[in-house]
Image (cartoon, rainbow, N blue to C red):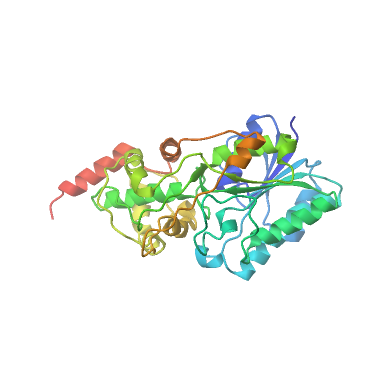
Amino acid sequence: MTGHVLIAGASGVIGQAAIAAFAAKGWQVTALSRRRPAVEAAYRHLAVDLTDPVASRAALEALPPVTHVVYAALFEEPDLVKGWQSLAQMDTNLAMLDAVIAPLTARGDRPHVSLFQGTKAYGVHIRPFPVPARESWPRHDHANFYWLQEDYLRAQAAKGHVTLTIWRPQVVFGSAVGVAMNLIPVLGVWAALCAAEGRGLSFPGGPAYLLEAVDAGLIADALIWAATSDRAVGETFNITNGDVYVWQNVWPTIAEATGLTVAPPQKAVLADVMPARAGIWRKISKDHALVQPDLAAMIGHSHHYADFTFATHAKREPAPALVSTIKLRQAGFNGCMDTEAMFRRLIADLQDRNLLPAPKALADLATYKEGAPE
């Protein structure tokens, strides 16, 4: 089975992976985002700002019937983590979802909608939760746009206007740059900045934090499964790679992938340090003929997210943040991914696209600096 899938937030980390996966399976793909996604595939792009409902309606009404929606659009405030508790942020995200769904259902489309939440649904940004978190738990009692969007869609489903599947991925990794929450560009840029100072790759975060990752491509595979499986309709699923990781333990793999050795840890608040070194990144980009010399366009808000996932501000070792994926496996999706292999592949992808320096180039730069005279 194939159909016409509309991917909202198409230039983001999940959106780009979804375009590639659905197009490869022969679906008709329409990508909705302000920026054109950096994906080589057969798809149509609509440049639309979802905070403008009039423009969104005009664009969507001209489309052929839409059978599926992947809603991966997201509005975040400049201070990413603080913004997670902002009522304005929540209202904006609800309005953006309505700007996609309302024009489609008004003309008679009855799409299946995949909607994204995350571990903030379990209050990971507020207090530790028991592990593993399960989808069957009552809602965590805090204000969140997740609940606003879910209630909106379930009300639409009750009217027969949509069907839905809700996804709760762990820390998502992909090859998109300039987005709110993708740590691969941050890791690559941080490695380049370390090399420019003549040292190996130092871990800038805090104490060990047991986490799970999920590859954006694995999410895309799950989206295709959900688009054709009755067992996904109306359900909420956690999704992860299937293993666990601690940053300090995978740091040697990340260092090797970038071309560096591991340096001693050196705590740094990346939300402060990286913007201050934008000029260094610009020079590195010029010297290595990279395609994105603008630091903000390269990492988006993701350096704020790095500080959160690195436990940079933690005074003691955080409680593990783990979720159960038994429900998804029992429903029929069994995809998995080795997290260390994921880091290698995604970093290599940015290097191959000339967004990050080649490993040898960084290794040579670090070695030169270490041996340079004072």
Does residue 339 appear to the left or right of 44 in the view shown?
left
Instruction: Give 338 or 27, whichever is nearer the viewer.
Output: 338
The quarter holding residue 315 reads bottom left
Instruction: Give 373 or 168, whichever is nearer the viewer.
Output: 168
Determine the residue positioned at 43% across, 43% down: 355
- Inspect this view and state whether residue 306 appears: yes
The quarter holding residue 359 reads top left
Q: Quadrant of the N terminus?
A: top right
Q: In x, y percent, where is residue 185?
A: 44, 48
Does residue 236 appear to the left or right of 292 in the view shown?
right
Q: In x, y percent, where is residue 32?
A: 67, 48
- Inspect this view and state whether residue 79 appears: no
Does residue 94 appear to the left or right of 220 in the view shown?
right
Determine the residue positioned at 51% across, 52% down: 131
* Image position of 199 with respect to 328: above or below: below
Q: In x, y percent, where is residue 38?
A: 56, 42
* Image position of 41 with respect to 59: above or below: above
Q: In x, y percent, where is residue 34?
A: 63, 53
Number of callouts: 0
Q: Outermost residue toward the bottom?
A: 87
Q: Quadrant of the C terminus?
A: bottom left
Instruction: Give 190 or 166, whichever is nearer the viewer.
Output: 166
